[in-house]
Structure formats: structure tokens, C-alpha cells
Image (cartoon, rainbow, N blue to C red):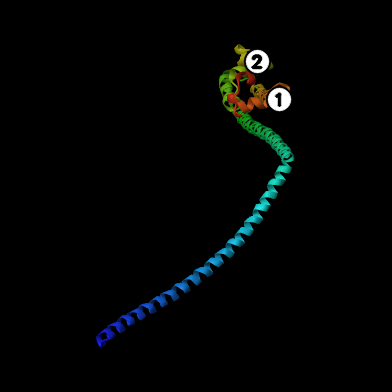
């Protein structure tokens, strides 16, 4: 073989050796990567096994819970029904309590407003009578009636017509002789009439306005059904 051919062969062999070296390096790198991947896979398998064991334990607990529920289904339903019935009873009782609280609050508010109105009315009568309440109202009767209506009757959702009928029956007078009614009697009858109306409103046992009728009227005497309000 000539020197030239030998040199060519050496060159090609040198190139092959270099390629083989690169291949070996690549194989080593790939091997290292595979080792890392293998270790990651091993760790993942360990985590998966741990998770699987934990899930199996939770599944077992759930199966026990389901079995317990199935075993006690009838008893649980009965207890649930009893609970619902008890809650319904409590709600009903609380509604009754709340309605009674609203009724009593209305009663107190109305009583205070009437008292304030009667106090104002007494001051007015004392002023108009010059401090002589036993004197007759005379020409002031109409003004006194309007004052009674504004200060007292309005608070109890009543009117002058019903009040006058009661007034005349109490003092033995009529429309034509109303001027002879004294300031004192106007004051006394205003008190007794206001008491009578409030008794009708808040004494259910005496045939007065019922709790249901107050609820229907949203606890406003002006919204009471005329039949429920009655004629005082």
C-alpha cells in the first residue's frame, strides 16, 4: 500500500475514533439521565404507593360510615322527623311570642299617647274654664269636642260621633243641651271612653280584638277591620 493510501486510511480511522468518542460521551450522558429519571420514577412510585395506601384507608372509613348510615337509616329518619317536628313547634311558639310582644308594645304606646293627650286636654280645660272645671262649657263645647278628638280620639282611632253618643248617655244630655255639659264631665268621660276603647282593643277574652285581627291589621288600629273594631 502506498503512503498516500495509508495516510487516507489513517485519516478516516481518526475521524471514526473521534465519532466513536462522541458516541461514548453521548451514551454516558444518556445513561446518567436515565439514572436520574429512574430515581425520579422510583420516588414517584413510592409517593404513589403512599397515596394509594392513604386513599385505601379513607375508602375503608367511608365504607364504614356508609354501612353505619345504612344500618341506622330508619332510626336516623325517625330522629330527623322528631327534630323537624320540634323545630316546627319552636317556630310556632316563637311566632306567638313575637305577635304578643308586638301587641303589648302597641298597647303600651297607645296608652302613653292617650295619657299625654288627656294631660294636654286637662290643661286646655283648666285654661278655658278659668280654673273652674265644674262650670259648663257653653259656647266652647264645639271647640272642646274638637280638642278631645285631636288629643285623644285620634290616638285610639275613634271619632267624635261615637264619642258623643257615649258622652250623652253618660251625662244625660243630648245634642241640643250639650252646652250644659261641664268641663269636668268632658274630662271624666274622655278618660272613661279612652279606657273602654283600649279594653276592647287589648282584652281578647272579653270579646275584643283578637291577636289574629291585630296581625291582619299589621298592628295599626286604623287598619282594623270595621267589624273587628266594633262600635264603642
Task: State which quarter of the image contains the N terminus.
Answer: bottom left
- Single out the residue that lies furthest toward the bottom: 3
Please give left or right for residue 84 compared with residue 138 in the image: right
Which secondary structure, mark 1? helix
Percent from the top left, x then y, of residue 184? 66, 23
Tell me the quarter of the picture where residue 122 sits: top right
Q: Residue at x 31, y 80 (%)?
A: 12
Residue 75 bears which disc, if any?
none
Please tell me which residue lies in front, 161 or 67. Answer: 67
* C-beta proximity under 8 Å, tags 1 and 2: no
Residue denoted by label 1 = 204
In percent of width and height, residue 206 lies at: 73, 22
Residue 42 visible in rendering: yes
Closest to the camera, between mark 1 and mark 2, is 1
Q: Quadrant of the C terminus?
A: top right
Give the Cα distance between marks 1 and 2: 27 Å
Q: Please say if 222 is above or below 176.
A: below
Looking at the image, is mark 1 or mark 2 earlier in the sequence?
2
Q: Nearer the viewer, residue 124 or 71?
A: 71
Residue nearest the viewer, comparing 187 with 227: 227
Task: List x then y, in percent, for residue 203.
Answer: 71, 26
Identify residue for label 2. 168
Residue at the farthest front position: 1
Query: Does residue 125 appear in the picture of this structure?
Result: no
**Residue closest to the eye, 44 or 26:** 26
Amino acid at each position: 500500500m502506498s503512503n498516500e493510501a495509508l495516510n487516507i486510511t489513517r485519516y478516516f480511522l481518526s475521524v471514526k475514533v473521534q465519532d466513536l468518542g462522541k458516541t461514548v460521551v453521548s451514551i454516558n450522558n444518556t445513561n446518567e439521565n436515565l439514572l436520574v429519571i429512574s430515581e425520579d420514577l422510583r420516588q414517584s412510585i413510592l409517593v404513589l404507593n403512599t397515596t394509594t395506601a392513604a386513599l385505601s384507608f379513607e375508602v375503608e372509613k367511608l365504607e364504614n360510615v356508609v354501612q353505619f348510615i345504612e344500618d341506622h337509616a330508619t332510626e336516623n329518619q325517625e330522629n330527623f322527623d322528631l327534630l323537624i317536628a320540634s323545630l316546627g313547634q319552636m317556630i310556632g311558639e316563637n311566632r306567638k311570642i313575637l305577635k304578643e310582644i308586638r301587641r303589648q308594645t302597641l298597647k303600651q304606646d297607645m296608652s302613653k299617647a292617650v295619657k299625654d293627650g288627656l294631660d294636654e286636654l286637662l290643661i286646655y280645660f283648666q285654661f278655658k274654664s278659668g280654673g273652674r272645671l265644674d262650670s259648663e262649657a257653653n259656647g266652647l263645647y264645639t271647640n272642646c269636642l274638637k280638642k278631645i278628638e285631636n288629643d285623644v280620639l285620634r290616638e285610639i282611632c275613634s271619632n267624635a260621633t261615637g264619642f258623643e253618643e257615649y258622652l250623652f248617655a253618660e251625662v244625660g244630655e243630648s245634642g241640643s243641651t250639650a252646652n250644659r255639659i261641664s268641663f269636668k264631665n268632658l274630662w271624666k268621660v274622655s278618660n272613661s271612653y279612652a279606657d273602654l276603647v283600649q279594653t276592647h282593643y287589648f282584652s281578647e277574652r272579653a270579646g275584643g280584638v283578637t291577636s289574629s285581627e291585630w296581625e291582619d291589621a299589621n298592628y295599626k288600629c286604623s287598619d282594623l277591620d270595621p267589624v273587628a273594631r266594633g262600635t264603642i
